[in-house]
């Protein structure tokens, strides 16, 4: 009975740990996507300002080249930030999807789920 309770406790703790890890992963993903969305919103605002200024300059016959160059530089910098954050997000997501590591494989090469006592492929007893 005590062995059963010990196994039950380990299983519950393992489940809680898994949920905690997945929650942290989802939270980090949402945070990164939020940062990207804010950068895209800022880029869109700058593009709107730039377009309005160019149109008014065309309409009035006097383009403000300094303003245009400044806005273009800001937009370029934000686009680089967006690209960097997107690459970070893709790398993070790829890391989360990685297959089992060598420590999580049986001698026969089969993937082992945490907490398994026996290999699902060859039946070999595993060390805890």
Image: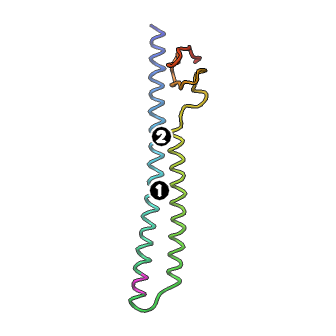
Disc 2 target residue: 24
| Residue 63 higher or lower than 121, as above or below | below
Residue 113, percent from left and from top: 50, 25
Disc 1, SS: helix
Instruction: Kindly report the secondary structure that dominates the magenta region of the rendered protein.
Output: helix
Residue at left offset 54%, top offset 67%: 77
Residue 101, percent from left and from top: 58, 31
Most distant residue in the top direction: 1
* Mark 1 nearby-residue class (10 Å; few <14, some 14–19, many ≥20): some
Count of numbered labels shown in the rendering: 2
- Give, as a single range, the part of the protein colored magenta: 53-57
Left of 127 or right of it: where is 71? left
Q: Quadrant of residue 84?
A: bottom right
How far is mark 2 from mark 1, CA to CA? 17 Å
Disc 1 target residue: 35
- Depth check, front residue: 92 or 109: 109
Q: Quadrant of the N terminus?
A: top left
Q: Which mark is residue 77?
A: none
Residue 29, percent from left and from top: 46, 47
Sequence-earlier tag: 2 or 1: 2
| Residue 57 higher or lower than 50, as above or below | below
Residue 57, percent from left and from top: 43, 87
Q: Quadrant of the C terminus?
A: top right
- Depth check, front residue: 124 or 18: 124
| Residue 60 higher or lower than 99, as above or below | below
Residue at left offset 47%, top offset 9%: 2
**Label 1 near label 2: C-beta < 8 Å?**
no
Disc 2, SS: helix
* Mark 2 nearby-residue class (10 Å; few <14, some 14–19, many ≥20): few
Residue 97 colored in magenta in the image? no
Residue at left offset 51%, top offset 65%: 78
């Amino acid at each position: 009975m005590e062995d059963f309770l010990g196994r039950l406790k380990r299983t519950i703790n393992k489940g809680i740990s898994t949920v905690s890890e997945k929650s942290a992963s989802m939270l980090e993903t949402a945070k990164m996507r939020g940062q990207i969305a804010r950068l895209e919103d800022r880029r869109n605002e700058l593009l709107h300002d730039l377009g309005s200024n160019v149109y008014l300059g065309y309409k009035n016959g006097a383009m403000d080249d300094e303003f245009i160059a400044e806005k273009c530089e800001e937009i370029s910098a934000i686009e680089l930030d967006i690209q960097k954050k997107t690459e970070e997000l893709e790398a993070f997501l790829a890391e989360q999807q990685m297959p089992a590591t060598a420590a999580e494989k049986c001698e026969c090469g089969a993937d082992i789920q945490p907490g398994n006592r026996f290999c699902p492929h060859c039946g070999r007893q595993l060390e805890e």
